[in-house]
Amino acid sequence: MNRNICIHGHFYQPPRENPWLEEIEIQDSAHPYQNWNERIAAECYFPNTSSRILDSHGRIAAIVNNYSKMSFNFGATLLSWMEKNEEEVYRSILAADKTSQENFSGHGSAIAQAYNHMIMPLANSKDKRTQILWGIKDFEYRFKRKPEGMWLSETAVDIESLELLAEYGIKFTILSPYQAHRVRKIGKDIWQDASAGKVDPTNVYLCNLSSGKSIAIFFYDGPVSQEVAFGDLLKDGANFAQRLMGKFSSYDSESQLVNIANDGESFGHHHKFGNMALSFLIDHIEKNKMADITIYGEYLEKNSPEYEVEIIENTSWSCSHGVERWRADCGCNVGTNAKWNQKWRVYLRQAMDWLRDEIKQIYVKESIECVKDPWDARDDYISVILDRNNENVEQFFERHSKCKLTEEQQIKSLKLLEMQRNAMLMYTSCGWFFDDISGIEPVQIMQYAARTIQLAKEVSGIDLEDKYISILDKAKSNIPKKKNGGKIYNVFVKPSVIDLLNVGAHYAISSLFQEHSRRERIYSYTIDSEIYEKYGVGKQKLIIGKALVVSEITFEKESINFVVLSFGDYNLSVGVRKHTEDHYFSIIHEEIKNSFMHNNVPEVINLINRYFAENSYSLWDLFKNEQGKAMTHIFEGTLNYIELNFRQIYDQYYPLMQIRKRTKMPLPKALAMTVEFILNRDILEIFEEEMINIEKLEMLVKEINRWNFMRDRENLELVTSKKISDMMDKLINSFGDVVLLENIEMTLGILSKLFLEIDLWKAQDLYFKLGKKLFAVMATKAKEKDKTAIRWLDAFNKLGERLEIKICT
């Protein structure tokens, strides 16, 4: 009997980017990380690139890349974010796919995914086609090969989607066992009922389609997959292995496949150290030759389907009512509040469908003058999304335009295509998945809708917003103060809408707090400064300038004039306007400058109001990620003053505090807060130094333990983790720096007394690399009585103990 095991991970996060900036803004709920993508990357995506296998003493015996031994798919929009923000993880995932081809007979571990996790049965035919095409092209761009399989969002399936998969050369997909209707032996007439999860998931099935094409379908093992997601299987790799082995039939002499499919985030994010259970499982099965670890593509090549299957259309893996979770109050939710309902889903879906159909008409009508086939152009637009350089955009228009387009026509065409892209992003499944319309996921897809509406108005003059909001008004929130989708849109979405003048305002305001070069890139915009003058009178500052703002997405551009009056704190008077004539701007410039230099601030404000009345801004018009930086800059002097006073109190009353400590009397709250503040500031400052001051750190740790204060533990854990990783990075690039090596080891030794949960994952990886690079060299030199090498080996081994790693000699 040929036993095979395949583990599939569906790694996915919804697109979270601000649609106008193409970047994710700070998400407070992800603290201490900047956003949820960053947090989950640290907890899951990175650990799976370098997962640990422990020895019998609990020390790290090996570090492995899980992706090279499992089947997986990553959402295209997630990989796009990762490429820009987590390049090391991104490269490791691509490398794992190449390695997997050596492991699995030339087949790669990675499969594609429908582009932005749209629920395919609820999509129209054109969107289904584009989703599949974009998913394939994105995959080919990244993995440099054609995908064999494709993951359907939420495994939501219908026959039309399967027909399209087959049409574009996709060999297989993966479904829940509850999505099978009936099966029969190929060549036989009699069907057997396979509904209600009765399908045998150890077989691969052929689904014949009305077009004459076919596609293979793997049904994952439902019970085991559920136990991985919601049970305790990932707490013990050995138990995990036994559970999988128990799924093989001892009566079947044919080849069998035990396969499970789970959210990839189960392996590290939902279940801490779940990635290590997976590593142990694979290593344990392979070492003991219990079964062959395989992936779907390899298994399909070696085992042609012997059974045919018919599926149940309009079903998914996460809704027991089919696909109602994404359009109705079906009862499926995450259990936030038992008294809540999800009737809002109906109207959110209606609003999106109405908007999609309206912009479809605008798209065709406005595109037809420029492009040969609007829908062919949209399908091919993924080539521009993946590479927005001017030459590539020109080649795109050469393929699709009816004639040589003017600059204005190119901009209009790009806006129309961006309108379509955002109209698909607004169907990302997470918008309906959770429990209330006020959640960050519905708000996110409403932002995509707002961008769609904005672009539609710019290219056609048609304003769709009021009608869209009127439909959302019917979507009642479960939270009384949030009222309904219309109010949520007006409060949380509409203020996010920006234009090129907003970008210019951000540029002007942010220049108060940081130096800008002549050409500055701000998110997805380029700003070319043509005139920039800064004047100062006491604490007050005046900035006047002219700049060209260009969108890197639509190539739209605007020449602007700007003025910023700062009163030395957070009070600003800011104006931005479209540039008209150089002579007129010179007059404005001179008038405002002269009034400012004569300290006539009221007149400066009057002039700003006169010349920039229609577009005035404040500090709060900075984009969210920069608001915090600006406030830090503004309050720097205040914080320094507070710190000076706190430190004086700390020094002056320290003897008295010691007496209270000895007599076991609690400190008064005011003094306790002072001690906390000073100790936190001091220890964070230590980690800003290039080399850790060991004596100072040791003294501070003693003080922290003396007073038992650790208020900002989570932030300190993040800071220390990053510092240790940075020091290890420096160490691996400096040949045999024994002083730095000793410094890292001693730092970890002292920090151990604080019982912090320091993330040493990257440090352990680098330690392994350092061992491969230098251990043998240093060991040889040590045998030759080289004192530096002996000292290095001693420090290296001590650090290994701190990191719980043993490098074999």
Image (cartoon, rainbow, N blue to C red):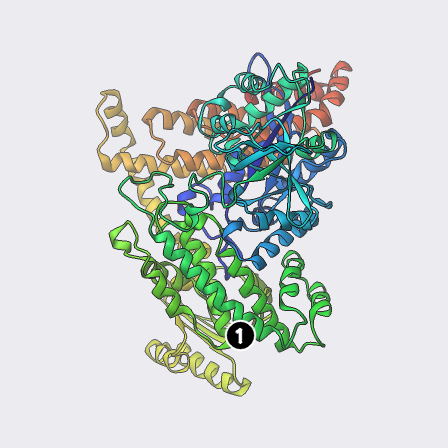
User: Which of the image's four quarters has the N terminus?
Assistant: top right
Q: Is residue 533 placed above or below 167 in the rendered structure? A: below
Q: Which of 72 and 578 is in front in this view?
A: 72
| Residue at x 46%, y 28% (from the top left corner) | 757
Q: Is residue 461 left or right of residue 551?
A: left
Q: Name the residue under label 1.
A: 459
Q: Is residue 217 placed above or below 232 in the rendered structure? A: below
Q: Which of 361 and 270 is in front in this view?
A: 361
| Residue 437 visible here | yes
Q: In which quarter of the image is residue 796?
A: top right
Q: Position of residue 347 (x, y in %)?
A: 37, 57
Q: Is residue 155 placed above or below 737 in the rendered structure? A: below
| Residue at x 49%, y 54% (from the top left corner) | 427
| Residue 541 visible here | no
Q: Nearer the viewer, residue 803 or 468?
A: 468
Element under label 1?
A: helix
Q: Where is residue 165 in the image (x, y as percent from the top left)?
A: 64, 48
Name the kind of residue labelled 1 in the image. Val
Tally of numbered discs? 1
Q: Which of 494 and 310 is in front in this view?
A: 310
User: Which of the image's four quarters has the C terminus?
Assistant: top right
Q: Where is residue 755 in the image (x, y as percent from the top left)?
A: 43, 24
| Residue at x 55%, y 73% (from the top left corner) | 547
Q: Is residue 714 placed above or below 389 in the rendered structure? A: above
Q: In this view, does 435 lie to the left or right of 36?
A: left
Q: Position of residue 227 (x, y in %)?
A: 47, 26
Q: Decide: few, some or many residues near mark 1? Use Cα within 10 Å; few <14, some 14-19, many ≥20.
A: some
Q: Seen from this angle, which residue lies furthest front?
A: 189
